[in-house]
Structure formats: C-alpha cells, structure tokens
Image (cartoon, rainbow, N blue to C red):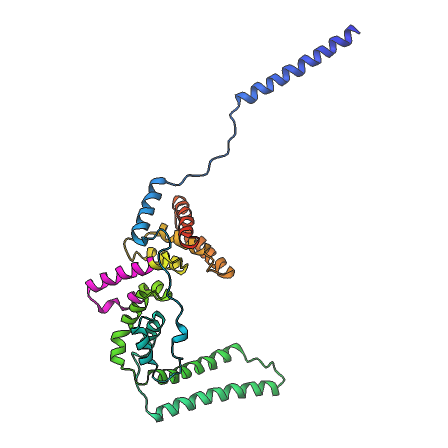
Amino acid sequence: MDRTVTVANICLTLIVSTAAGWLAAREAAPVATVAPEPSVDSVELARLRQIDAALAGVDTRTSAAPAWQAEQLPPVDAPAREPRLRALADDGNAYAAKELSELLKRCRFYQPRTQRELDVVASQLAVVQAQIAEARVEAIENALDTELPAAVIDEVDMAEVIIADELKREHECAGVDTRMAAREWFDWYERAAGLGHPDAQTTYWQEMLRTHTAITAAELVRRKQLARTFLSSALGRGDAEALDAWSKVHRRGLFGEPDPTLAHAYLLAYVRSAAVGLAERMLLGAAADRAGQALSPAQRRLAEQLGKEIHQRCCRG
C-alpha cells in the first residue's frame, strides 16, 4: 500500500514538474503576433485631399441637372431644324444647345451636292441593299444557313451606313452656313455645359483638347478654368461619369502635374458607382487592377482610402 502511494506521488511530481517546465519555456519563448496592416501615410493623404479639394472644389451635392427638355426638341428629320434648335438654345434649353452644337459640328465640312450627285448616292445605296437581298436568297436556295458570313455582313453593313449617313447629312445640313458652323459649334457646346447639360459638362474638357491648337494661350487658360468648373459641377451633382472624367484628367495632368494616385482613386470610385453595370464593373475592375500595378503599395493604399471618400462624397450624398 505504501509502495503504491509512493509510486503515485513520484508520477504526480514528474507530471507537475514537466508541466511547470513547459509553461516556463512557453513564457520565455517570443510570442507570435500577426503583423498589423500597413498604415496609410497621413501626411501624404492630407496633401492629396488638399489637392483634390482645390481642384474639384466640391464637398457636398451643390448643383442639379436641368429638367429634361428633349421633348421640346424638333425631330431629327424635321425641316429647318437648325434655326429651331437655335431659338430653343437662345431661350436657355441646355439640350437644344447640345443638339445644335453637334449639328453644327457635323455640318462644318459639308459640301452641298447637286441633285445628280444625290441620285448617284441613292442608287449606290439601292445597289448595296440589293446585294444583301440577293446574297440571302442565294444562301437559302443552296440550303445554306440564312445568316451571311460575318465578313460579308460587315462589308455591306459598313457601305450601307456610310451611304445612308451621307444622305442624312445632306438632309440635315441643307441651309446651314458651314463657315458659321465651324466657328460656332464649340461655343454652343460650351453654352450647353454652362446651362448644366450633364454630358456636355463631363466631356467639355475632351472637346477643348481637340480644338486648342487654333486658340490663344489666354483662351486656353479660360477654357481650362471652365472645364474644371464644369467637372466640379457634375461631381457636386453626383454624376458618376464625372468620376471617370476626373480620373482621366488627373492622369493627363490637365490642371496641374499628372497625379497617378488621385487618378487611381477616382477610377476606384467610378468602379464602385451604381452607374456602372455589372459587366462593365468587372472590366473596369480588371483595368483598375492593371493600372494599380504601376503604383507602389503605399500609393495603392492611399488611392483605396481616397477612392472610398470620393465615392461617398459624390454618389452617396
């Protein structure tokens, strides 16, 4: 009995001493910790916020798009469309101003054709349409698929589009002063943006770049200031397309030095916006991932933080 108790005591002592040694070794060993997430550079974040505020200049929704006025516009095939659009635009219709600008832009290189030339164009269109019909009949007679080969479809469709476009331009540009159209189309585009047309505001900067070679330095500065104002207005209105525009503007450095971090932040905000459909969001997301590879890890963290803030400011206000 005494021997059994002694053995039990020895075993218990060994267990206790072993456990004590394990605990001591565990306490002495360095504790494994999970590395914290890298922090965003607060100084650089503040600098970028300051630049963004100075350029975009919008903290909350500050403007509204004009009421939809398309129902007032004359139909595309209406006679004397240009003077009717001009009258509506003079009355402050933003959509009429945009339509007028696009009409004048299309007609600025218009060369009137004689009736004989128009008859030739119309006959060319008829020939192309006849070729399409004949090819389909032949396919059916030969028990082939009624769908024409893609290459044939592309060729005849392109010819039909080009010829039809010529006839359309002849119709809508008749009576338009081409010299006046060349001078005025951009002015009306600017007027449409100033009246609040959403698309004109977010694309004015692109049209400005296409026409800047024939203007003075002072006029270019004025247009750049307007472009910034229009983009700020669109952003303040909550227009998601302004996010895409600001991303491209920052990437080009239109209003200052190119800033890839801000450009990426706006692109990420645009990807988050509800205006982007699922398929487009996937494509944009992949494009954003590729663009982000050109940035450093620190820049990517800054862009992600700013992108969330910009999206919140623009599209959830």
* Residue 229: quarter of image: bottom left
Main secondary structure type of the part rendered in magenta: helix
Residue 22 or residue 33, whichever sits in front = 33
The answer to whether any part of residue 293 appears in the image is no
* Residue 158: quarter of image: bottom left
- Side of 258 where 154 appears, left or right: right
Q: Is residue 211 magenta?
A: yes
Name the image quarter holding the N terminus.
top right
As drawn, 243 above or below 45: below
Q: Where does the image place residue 72, in percent across and percent down from the top left?
A: 39, 75
As drawn, 34 above or below 159: above
Q: Where does the image place residue 163, in percent across and percent down from the top left?
A: 41, 84
Q: Give the residue furthest to the right.
A: 1
The answer to whether any part of residue 45 appears in the image is yes
Q: Which residues are magenta?
A: 206-232
Q: Residue at x 48, y 87 (%)?
A: 129
As drawn, 219 above or below 42: below
Q: Give the residue furthest to the bottom.
A: 116
* Residue 177: quarter of image: bottom left
Q: Where does the image place residue 125, in percent across and percent down from the top left?
A: 44, 87
Residue 225 or residue 91, whichever sits in front = 91
Residue 183 or residue 151, whichever sits in front = 183
As drawn, 298 above or below 276: above
Q: Residue at x 51, y 85 (%)?
A: 132
Q: Is residue 255 magenta?
A: no
Q: How many marks?
A: 0
Q: Give the residue furthest to the top.
A: 2
Q: Where does the image place residue 89, in percent across and percent down from the top left?
A: 31, 73
